[in-house]
Amino acid sequence: MKTMIRALCLGSALLAAALPFGGAFAAGDPIPVGVIANLTGNDVKTSEQMVRGVELAADAINAAGGIGGRPVKLIVEDAEYKTQEALNAATKLYDIDKVDAAIMFGGSSLMLAVAPIAKDKGKVIINTSSSSPQLGNFPGTIFSILPLDDIVGKELGSWVASKGVKTVAFVVPNNTFGTGLMDASAKAFEAAGGKVVAKVTYTEGQPDYRADLQQLVALKPDAIITAGYGDDSRTVFKNARLLGLNMPWYAAYPSILTVEDPKWMDGRLAGVDNGGLSGAKAKEVEAAYAKKYGDGEMMAHVYYGYDAMTVLAKALADGGNLAAALPKAISGYDGATGKIVWDDRGQRIDPPIDIIVYEGGKFVTKGSK
């Protein structure tokens, strides 16, 4: 576990005028906000993008005068994509740094491990990445900026069926993310009249998955529905290409997958992803990102980090019980990820959903669902 105190730009006024904070800094101490992300190990790039989104929001809040005149101080902890390190990070933030909330980016297994600690201590987690439906079992503790897999999986399954696909096989990692999404998607696909011919769940971190995929050669499904990330997805796609699994591939969150052979995958991969990233606030965040970090690649995780920090700051400004203030904080908030609506568990419902296609060597948004 590594701790980073992020220095924030207090002079920039970009985005500040739109935020509900103001006044000169008071003599009070900065308000500490915890951030837990995987800055070493797996999932580093996406974690760093989320942290940058949080930083952009904190910059804007501080430029507008902070929260009740007090500046935000981010305390960033590295979970290293390890459960024990995530637990260490949360314990430090809650017990030593005395934060009331931690903005967290990590796998569902990490967040589900941290959630009981936060619940016992009366603290809050703002979820920017994890999507297991089990996260809904912690109302008043976990508040999600993105929808959970039961919603996205349902959208994916029904969308694939609407394209005339009759039979599918699933290829997903054997973890809470992969199996939860598969179950929701399969249920929706079968409800629409489709048939699931195989469910392949693979162990993460393996050098080769041909033994897992071999059965699909004989089954010949019309399409394959997948989910995953990083090096594992690259290996799965490489093995599928070598085995001749040339049918269409449909995915949840396709932009987090890593394509192994752009020519082979061109036009073959499509899917659904969280939408709402083209509104006015998203454009403002893009401009702020380019100014602070340059014109390099900007991923969707920036927007989720930005909205997490902004919503949290609005709740902190309320001054009361944080878990009670958070639902009020999203009222009327149209953020970088669109309008946020939570159910009574603090989980996002009715989110905008985009259709994504891989073509020309990149992921392209082709409309909304």
Image: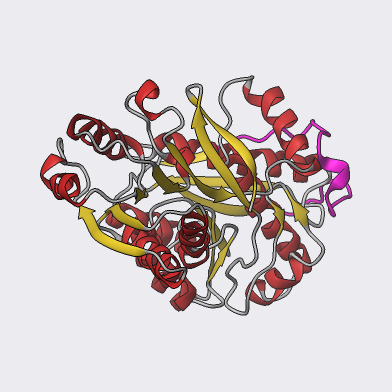
* Residue 269: quarter of image: top left
- Start-end of magenta stretch: 6-28
How many tags in the picture? 0
1 or 336: which is nearer to us? 336
367 or 197: which is nearer to us? 197
Left or right of 34, for residue 57 = right
Q: Residue at x 72, y 39 (%)?
A: 59
**How does the figure colour the protein chain or chains?**
secondary structure
Quarter holding the C terminus is: bottom right
Q: Is residue 18 magenta?
A: yes
Left or right of 256, for residue 275 = right
Q: Is residue 321 above or below residue 33?
A: below
Q: Residue at x 70, y 43 (%)?
A: 57
Q: Is residue 300 above or below residue 351?
A: above
Q: Residue at x 70, y 32 (%)?
A: 286
306 or 338: which is nearer to us? 338
- Measured as percent of width and height from the top left, residue 172 is found at 29, 52
- Measured as percent of width and height from the top left, residue 348 is found at 61, 66
Q: Is residue 257 visible?
A: yes
Q: Is residue 31 visible?
A: no
- Measured as percent of width and height from the top left, residue 23 is found at 89, 49
Q: Is residue 125 magenta?
A: no
Q: Is residue 279 above or below residue 328?
A: above
Q: Residue at x 40, y 38 (%)?
A: 257
- Measured as percent of width and height from the top left, residue 285 is found at 72, 37
The secondary structure making up most of the magenta span is loop
Q: Residue furthest left?
A: 211
Left or right of 119, for residue 218 = left
